[in-house]
Image (cartoon, rainbow, N blue to C red):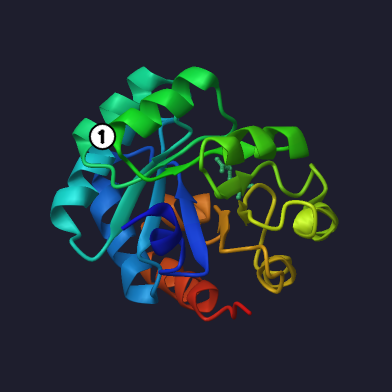
Amino acid sequence: MDISAIASLAPVIPVLTIERQADAVPLARALVRGGLRVLEITLRSGVALEALRAIASEVPDAVVGAGTVLNAHQLDQARKAGARFVVSPGCTHGLATAASASGLPFLPGVQTVSEAMALAERGLTLLKFFPADTAGGVGWLKAVAAPLASLRFCPTGGIGADSAPAYLALTNVACVGGSWVVPRGAVAVQDWPQIERLAAAAAALKRP
Ligand code: 3PG
C-alpha cells in the first residue's frame, strides 16, 4: 500500500503518544474495533518503539506507523520496529532522501506553499498540513486547492471532533490526523470502551 491507499482506509488517523507499554495493544485494539485501522505512534515517549513493535505483531488489522520522525536514524528505528509508514511534522533533505531509499510510505509535514512545492518535486503528493489549526486551517487548504491542484493533505494539529468535518469536506483533504480520539484521561484509567466509542464516531465521519 502506498501512502494514499493507507490514507483512504479511514477518515481519521489517531495520533498516539503511548506512555505505558501495557496500554499499547489494548489501545490499538479498541481503535481498530471502533473502525480506525491506521494508527500513528509518535516517537515522543520512551516506549514508543516497543509499543509500535507490539502493535505491529499483535494487532494484525492495524496499519501502524511512526510519527514525529525527525531524521534518518529514527526512520530506520521505526522501520525495524515494524512501522508500515512514517509521518514527520516537517521535512528535511536528509529525511526525504532516507524515506525514499527505505521504500516506506511517507507522510511529510508542510506548513507553506514552498515546502509543499519542494516535496511535490520529489513526487510526494500527499502531505501532512501541520500544525493545521494555527497555520491557517480550512482557509489555507481552500486557498491552495487551485494552485496546488495535484496535492492532497492530511491536516493535523489542533483538530477535534467539532472541527474535523469541515476539513474532511474539502476535496484536497484525504483524511485528518489528531489525538482527540485518545484522551489522556481515558488511557490513564484504561477506559477502552470510551476510546472505541470515540473511534467509531471518528470512523463514521464522511469524506466527499
Ligand atoms: C502530531 O504530532 O501530529 C500532533 O501532536 C497531533 O496534534 P493534536 O494533538 O493537536 O491532535
Q: Quadrant of ligand 1?
A: top right
The quadrant holding residue 178 is bottom right
Which residue is found at the position 67% from the left and 63% from the top? 172
Q: Amino acid at mark 1?
A: Arg
Front in this rendered view, residue 37 or 175:
175
The quadrant holding residue 119 is top right
Which residue is found at the position 20% from the left and 49% from the top? 56
Image spot of residue 192 (x, y percent): 36, 65
Which residue is found at the position 66% from the left and 70% from the top? 168
The quadrant holding residue 54 is top left
146 with respect to 169 (left or right): right
SS label for mark 1: helix
- Residue 116 higher or lower than 90, as above or below: below
28 with respect to 203 (left or right): left
Extreme-left residue of the structure: 57
Q: Which residue is mark 1?
A: 79
Image spot of residue 156 (x, y percent): 62, 50
177 with respect to 80 (left or right): right
Which residue is found at the position 35% from the left and 65% from the top? 37
